[in-house]
Image: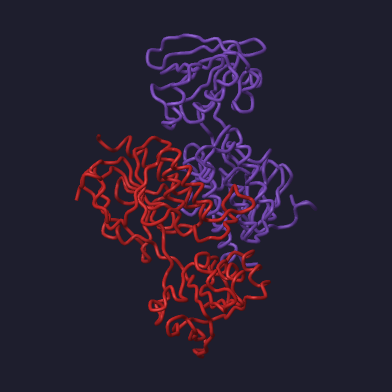
Chain colours: A purple, B red
């Protein structure tokens, strides 16, 4: 459906306003490509949840994910990037036209960069849906302050889980990290900090089977993954940080994906469909880092520019 | 040759201290990998020559290449990255050991990230070698100030050439941009600035055949690439910005390369030799941007970490 508002055909549409999308936006706008960036909610993606990003090159003292997003957004905006808030629901191809279907109708363009990022995986256990926002959270930076002097749990073993556990020590009385394996995947320096933090206790080889509580989280039912032995822990909050799922449902029909739903690209961000590129966390084998996403975005924008110049008959 | 100084075997050696190498260094040092970064001269690579980097995401007001390098170097150093100054001359493999041959002897390690970047191509015309440093330059940021109120030429048509021409207008009386084609490859916004700058005159479809002058540059002998017609222009300086050549001679015997000498990798920076990765400008199909190099470096370091953990018997 082409409405009065969106009958304009853009040269390029970028789906997603995290580091990959914003970096692509900076490059495309600076390249004077007529570009629209479509973001569902607020700009920034997963990185906005990071209290302190220590490994984005150029910020020796670290920078909060929120501030880094704000800087990138301002940079894109200074170069003239246009943005629109809508939920992308589909992607289609009609000859040289690419159609981005959204909650606000169809947007037309010649090239698309999919940079829709990822969302936290759910545990998929009883109580998780019911107690969402009542003790169940996917973002310590967002919700940590609600748990002043309470006992809380974090589930997971990667960088996100360990960082959330550490962030929570500033509010919570105690933090248990529940991890299904007997070693962490997190970066060494982050692990060292965790192990030296007296408020944190790690429960190894253990999974959460159920989240219990009447109108708010009260207890977790646990199970040892090796022995099968059951146990429980009393907490007021549980932060799920077990992994990320790519937000690519809208592109399933059109693009090649791996089993988890990551988009397959070559090393210059091209998908199998000409004029459609993917960048950042949505890509298969992405390192899922802020700087790798930003690098992907730049590469995708430069390739889109080349595609628009050489392949599209205008 | 293993000397007293370098008989220590590192887990990882990074070759090159530009954005790719420094980003890899930040990630590796933060991952507590025993890492040495070897750089030939000063840190920073090609980017240090950039007066203002406007497209590195996170710096809306731009940042000089020198300052950005300094920030990255400080960040790597805060995480404990060790560095050494030497010229890398060769790369070899002996079972699980990787040998980095340098002007200071051999350094041993288990994994290598080649991030040695690129150098400016030469024109290869008479007078270029003879008048080097006497009017012939490859870096306007470095040498521009020597040409106060003089007439200078820049050769090339990409971002580097146009940026150098613009930078030179602050010193020179006039700048001719000599370009072999009839359109520029530079980013649109950079082209716009060039065309609105009254001090700059573009000579299209033209190549430099000879650089003339006794003890310093006085004149360029030019030729129209289409008609063959000869001409000349009087200048006191010529800045060559026709392209980049990868600094990969030391790895030719070991790694697959394209015709220009860029190293072939897959999308996670692996070369054909296990434990040897490549990142940044040296890679085939690299976008040759600061942020893409930094992204490459992060990916390479994380892959090297995985390789060291899973593949190397220690």
Of all residues, the one furthest to the right in this rendering is A4
Residue B253 appears anywhere in the view: yes
Q: Residue at x 48, y 54 (%)?
A: A268
Snapshot quadrant of residue B213: bottom left
Give residue B229's position: percent from left, percent from top: 51, 90
Q: Nearer the viewer, residue B210 or B303?
A: B210
Give residue B232's position: percent from left, percent from top: 52, 87
Give residue A254's position: percent from left, percent from top: 56, 48
Q: Judge from the rendering whether residue B237 lies leftward or rightward of residue A313; answer left or right.
A: left
Of all residues, the one furthest to the left in this rendering is B1
Residue A271 appears anywhere in the view: no
Q: How many marks?
A: 0
Q: Residue at x 33, y 43 (%)?
A: B12
Q: Quadrant of the C terminus of chain A?
A: bottom right
Q: Residue at x 54, y 43 (%)?
A: A59
Q: Judge from the rendering whether residue B62 lies leftward or rightward of residue B22; answer left or right.
A: right
Q: Nearer the viewer, residue B157 or A205?
A: B157
Of all residues, the one furthest to the bottom in this rendering is B229
Q: Residue at x 61, y 28 (%)?
A: A141
Give residue B58's position: percent from left, percent from top: 59, 47
Q: Judge from the rendering whether residue A174 lies leftward or rightward of residue A76; answer left or right.
A: left
Q: Judge from the rendering whether residue B206 lies leftward or rightward of residue A44; answer left or right.
A: left
């Amino acid at each position: 459906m082409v409405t009065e508002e969106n009958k304009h055909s853009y040269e390029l549409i970028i789906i997603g306003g995290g580091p990959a999308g914003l970096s692509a936006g900076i490059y495309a706008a600076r390249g004077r490509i007529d570009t629209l960036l479509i973001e569902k909610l607020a700009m920034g993606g997963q990185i906005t949840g990071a209290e302190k990003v220590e490994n984005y090159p150029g910020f020796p003292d670290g920078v909060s994910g929120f501030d880094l997003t704000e800087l990138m957004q301002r940079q894109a905006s200074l170069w003239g990037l246009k943005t629109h808030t809508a939920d992308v629901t589909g992607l289609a191809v009609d000859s040289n036209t690419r159609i981005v279907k959204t909650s606000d109708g169809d947007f037309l363009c010649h090239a698309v960069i999919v940079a829709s990022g990822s969302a936290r995986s759910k545990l998929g256990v009883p109580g998780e849906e019911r107690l969402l926002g009542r003790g169940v959270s996917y973002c310590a930076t967002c919700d940590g302050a609600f748990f002043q002097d309470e006992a809380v749990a974090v589930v997971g073993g990667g960088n996100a889980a360990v960082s959330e556990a550490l962030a929570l020590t500033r509010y919570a009385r105690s933090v248990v990290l529940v991890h299904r394996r007997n070693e962490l995947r997190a970066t060494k320096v982050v692990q060292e900090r965790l192990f030296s933090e007296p408020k944190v206790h790690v429960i190894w080889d253990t999974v959460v089977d159920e989240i219990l509580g009447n109108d708010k989280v009260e207890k977790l039912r646990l199970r040892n993954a090796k022995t099968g032995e059951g146990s429980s822990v009393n907490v007021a909050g549980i932060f799920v940080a077990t992994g990320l799922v790519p937000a690519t449902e809208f592109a399933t029909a059109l693009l090649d994906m791996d089993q988890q739903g990551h988009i397959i690209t070559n090393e210059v961000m091209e998908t199998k469909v000409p004029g459609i590129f993917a960048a950042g966390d949505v890509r298969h084998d992405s390192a899922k880092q802020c700087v790798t996403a930003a690098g992907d975005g730049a590469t995708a924008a430069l390739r889109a520019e080349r595609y628009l110049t050489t392949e599209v008959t205008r």
